[in-house]
Image: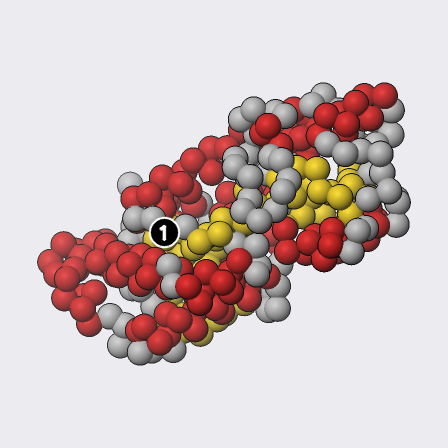
Amino acid sequence: MRPISKRHLLHAAWFLLAAVGTPAIAQAWPTKPVRMIVPVGAGSAPDVIARIVGEKLATTWGQGVVVDNRPGAGGIPGMSGLARSAPDGYTIGFVPAAMGTITPLVFKNPQFNPDHDLAPAVTVGISPLMLVVPATSGIQSMADLAKHAKAHPGKVNFAAPQLNSLPHLAGEMVSKAGGMGMFTVPYRTPPEAVAAVLAGDAALTVDGVPSLLPHMKSGRLRAIGVTSAQRLPGIDVPTVAETYPGYEAIGWFQIIVPAGTPSAIVERINADVNRITASPEVIARLSELGIYPRQDSVAAARAFFVQQQGAMKHLVNELGVQPQ
């Protein structure tokens, strides 16, 4: 018989407590500061969003919310740290889409299993991506891109921001959907990929809306598609799905907790975050970062995670991405 680990005993103890008195647990919680693990570096866009939400949660809870940045290796230090934390509500994670659903697929030893170790509590918002080309390019649409790529097989460079990132996979997905056979050039960071397109070294790249808008407004880049299922408010750019039905590749952010966290605490987190992201002030601040708030229940947040997880598994398998 395999010995029972200390972690599983801890989870079992919390499940027992939850069964006995979850309302009391949630009513008393939190009585001390809450740590929010963010698996990216300080100053990055996800970190900024996490701090906006954390600041509001601290006010709501009357306790500090301490942001704990743990960047590197596809978010593994942060995600594995979250997975190993006590399921007591005093450690939560602010998780971007890639770390939750792509990292477990593209690393041989991610050191955490999202199905067993983690539990989504609430979706903070979604973050669509945009495909851009140089404004001097003759490519005006997704159809133009496909036509150009097919006329120059293997010669249309796609500047991929970070290997196996969501923008990278989103671009590969476009190439596959249109039978374009684009030549992928991986860059270390999204700004480097954008710089390559601006310099004319690449035909296109994919990135988040906020980082691309200034270049669009300056007239240096042209957007030819957004990766969400619907067009974005205030941005007159067709969706990729209008050319390739069924296409969708979105970023998102969720508050995720260690598996076994008492359900009453998870429900409390869900309700408080939903109230925060429904406030006009937070909606305005997030919109500046290209984030569209999304209020959902705990069950809906978990269903959304599973749906996105399935989509990423399908995509990684379709593209033949090998774990590193």
Relative to 11, residue 316 above or below: above
Q: Quadrant of residue 18?
A: bottom left
Query: In screen coordinates, is 143 left or right of 94?
Result: right
Q: Residue at x 85, y 38 (%)?
A: 137
Residue 134 spot, x, y in % from top left: 82, 44
Q: Residue at x 41, y 38 (%)?
A: 306
Residue type at tag 1: Gln
Residue 319 spot, x, y in % from top left: 64, 28
Q: In the displayed image of the protein, which residue is found farthest to the left?
A: 20
Query: Label 1 belongs to which residue?
Result: 295
- Viewer-proximal residue among 184 and 212: 212
The N terminus sits in image quarter? top left
Relative to 322, residue 80 above or below: below
Residue 176 spot, x, y in % from top left: 68, 25
Query: In screen coordinates, is 295 left or right of 104?
Result: left
Q: Residue at x 40, y 71 (%)?
A: 56
The C terminus sits in image quarter? top right
Query: Can residue 287 be seen here?
Result: yes
